[in-house]
């Protein structure tokens, strides 16, 4: 869900709205699939007996109880963590029940740095560090297409809003 228009100033334009890269869910998706396959296999291989129905129900209940903290909570955390770059600021929002947010005006950014591990490079993401004069950088973790976002922010810092909005990696 994009940032509501009511949270933007009159002449502010959203340049990019994004979530963290879905790679943060990769291992959890693998665990989810493994648990589902295990549940189906065990359900099929249980012998026909009086207790079979109860055992299958208990098995799927245990799988659901395991999946809640292992998959659904991290997925909700991923869904509610967003980064928005506008023509005037960088906005972060996160939280499922307790919401946190940070608005960093572009005028306070003195340096934009990116860091990409080998895994980040495989998935096309990375971390972006926005340095301010207060020596408290705002670090955006697992930013998709981090190089392009760095170019867009740099364009905005040099007051090239059109260049940031129309930034094309193929040019």
Image (cartoon, rainbow, N blue to C red):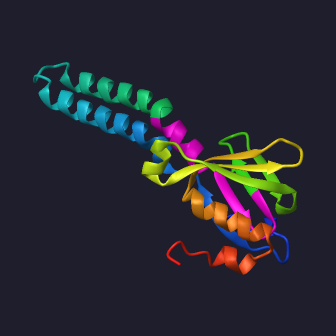
Q: Which residue lies at the image location 65% right of the left edge and 65% below the top edge? A: 151
Is 85 placed left or right of 74 in the picture? right
Above or below, 34 relative to 140? above
Q: Position of residue 169 (x, y in %)?
A: 53, 72
Residue 25 in magenta stretch: no
Nearest the eye: 123 or 79: 123
Q: Which residue lies at the image location 75% right of the left edge and 46% below the top edge? A: 138
Identify the magenta region. Answer: 71-90
Q: Which residue lies at the image location 31% right of the left edge and 32% below the top edge? A: 35
Is 47 placed left or right of 28 in the picture? left
Work out whether residue 150 can be spotted: yes
Q: Position of residue 72 (x, y in %)?
A: 49, 39
Above or below, 136 relative to 12? above
Nearest the eye: 139 or 31: 139
Is 161 placed left or right of 34 in the picture? right
Q: Which residue lies at the image location 29% right of the left edge and 34% below the top edge? A: 34
Work out whether residue 5 can be spotted: no
Quadrant that contains the N terminus:
bottom right
């Amino acid at each position: 869900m994009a940032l509501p228009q009511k949270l933007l100033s009159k002449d502010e334009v959203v340049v990019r709205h994004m979530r963290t890269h879905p790679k943060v869910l990769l291992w959890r998706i693998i665990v989810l699939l493994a648990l589902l396959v295990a549940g189906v296999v065990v359900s099929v291989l249980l012998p026909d007996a009086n207790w079979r129905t109860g055992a299958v129900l208990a098995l799927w209940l245990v799988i659901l109880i395991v999946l809640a903290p292992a998959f659904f909570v991290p997925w909700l955390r991923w869904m509610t963590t967003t980064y928005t770059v506008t023509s005037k600021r960088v906005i972060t929002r996160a939280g499922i029940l307790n919401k946190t947010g940070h608005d960093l005006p572009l005028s306070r950014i003195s340096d934009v740095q990116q860091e990409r591990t080998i895994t980040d490079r495989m998935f096309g993401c990375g971390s972006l560090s926005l340095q301010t004069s207060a020596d408290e950088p705002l670090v955006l973790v697992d930013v998709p297409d981090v190089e392009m976002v760095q170019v867009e922010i740099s364009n905005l810092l040099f007051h090239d809003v059109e260049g940031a909005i129309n930034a094309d990696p193929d040019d």
